[in-house]
Amino acid sequence: MNNQQFSVIPDTSNYWLKNAHVPVCLIETDSEISSDTREGLSLVNIEIKNGIITQIVHSSAKLSSTGDIPTVDLKGGMVWPCFVDMHTHLDKGHIWVRSPNLDGSFNGALDAGARDAGKYWNAEDIYRRMEFGLKCSYAHGTKAIRTHLDCFGEQVNISLEVFQTLQKEWEGKLILQPVSLVTGDYYLTEAGEKLADQIADVGGILGAVPFMSSDVDNQLDRLFSLAKERQLDLDLHTDENGDPNSRVLHKVAEKAISHQFSGKIICGHCCSLAVQTPEKVIETLELVNEAGISIVSLPMCNLYLQNRQDNYTPRWRGVTLLHELKKQVISVALASDNCRDPFFGFGDHDVLEVFNMSVRIAHLDMPYGDWPNAVTKTPADLIGLPNIGRIKVGLSADLILFKGRNFSELLSRSQHDRVVLRNGRVIDTTLPDYCELDSLFE
């Protein structure tokens, strides 16, 4: 057990968390709880009984009766619900040591990743790296993860089997969802249709990377048809580049409308929006809104890869238009994407880091508003988990307690001493040692 945690939680089924600063946007309660600070925080007391949140009241309210119920004074420390990481690549994770991206480019990442997969990706290799990622995510306070899995050829059988094994082993700790990852043209083949059937069989999400080409309309028509026939949702990588002529997001929106698609559509990255003309941006966002498409941005990976050239300082951040999307009432989430692989050489599966970096990269402060939703409530809703990612009476006490009392404190230190509660009980937040993976790199 990590003995450096900042607060001691009693080993009992019923207790109060007192004087907790909680972003108001993350609280769902019948009684109105207003903000106490310019940052949108409210100082509240939270009762936990038998693993369930039973009361949320403002700290100024007189408690009905605490009796002999233990109380934990958080002294203004922040409390968040457990995180939802809705766009990851767990099967690629932690291969940087053996397959680095030596020029840091997107094409370099594709090449290094493909070489690593061709040489090493057997069941044991994928299992151990994915398990390592899950250990990190769980310790940091994540409750649900959606991962894209490379599914070309025979790799799909290996990866889906490993995924299902881990899904069962982590049941009750982490909710795991699989998304197929292939290029858009793959679904025009017999193998692509078989893949759609396999994804339906495991209750997954149909995913793809459609690139701008003369065939992109045909690819998207086929993709929507396969998804509709199998009643699958879609989760696509779109426009992960800085080319203003890359308008796959626009085409996906057009196809969603023409196919009258009723399932959920998530589009990730959407980087090229940031380098398009205002007229094209408005045109696309209006279509995206009409089509009911939601966007997940991956700021850390996009900052790392986009606009990278030798001896050149990048002129843009590689991140999509988060504020403009939100202004158009389009659901926007943030997620971690890759971790210590050729697409992003860093990371630790910590969604707080994702939020922290996103605030800096995309200016999500002044005000913070409801941006905390982007790593909790919003992704939970987008991936079909409406009872997580929020603090609400009647829900499980799956919470993260931070010593930081406001956003400046929260985002200025690592919060490595956080306390993670699952069903009201403290979990071990000790992170796995990197040496666990050493034998994979010998």
Image (cartoon, grey):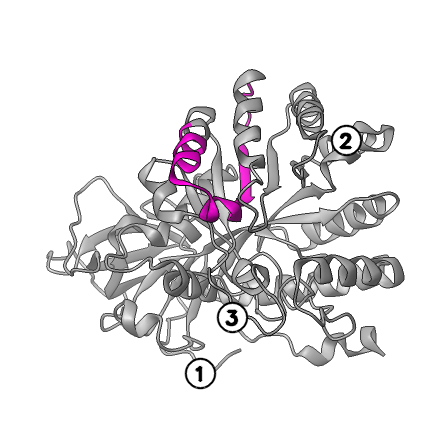
The range drawn in magenta is 260-286
* Circle on res. 313: 3
Instruction: Classify mark 1: helix, strand or loop.
Output: loop
Which amino acid, by three-letter code, is at mark 3? Thr
Q: Which residue is mark 1?
A: 4
* Circle on res. 136: none
Looking at the picture, how far across and down is residue 43, in whole percent?
Answer: 19, 61
> Tag 3: Cα neighbours inside 10 Å, few (<14), some, or many (≥20)?
few
Residue 277 drawn in magenta: yes
Tag 3 and tag 2, C-beta contact below 8 Å: no
State whether residue 283 is above or below residue 162. above
Q: Which residue is mark 2?
A: 187
State the separation of the CA atoms marked 1 and 2: 50 Å
- Judge by depth and name the residue closer to the eye, 417 or 92: 92
State the separation of the CA atoms marked 3 and 1: 40 Å
State whether residue 382 is above or below residue 176. above
State whether residue 259 is above or below residue 90. above
Tag 1 and tag 2, C-beta contact below 8 Å: no
Dot 3 or dot 2: first in sequence order is 2
Which amino acid, by three-letter code, is at mark 2? Tyr
Instruction: Classify mark 2: helix, strand or loop.
Output: helix
Dot 3 or dot 1: first in sequence order is 1
Marks 1, 2: nearer the viewer: 2
Instruction: Classify mark 3: helix, strand or loop.
Output: loop
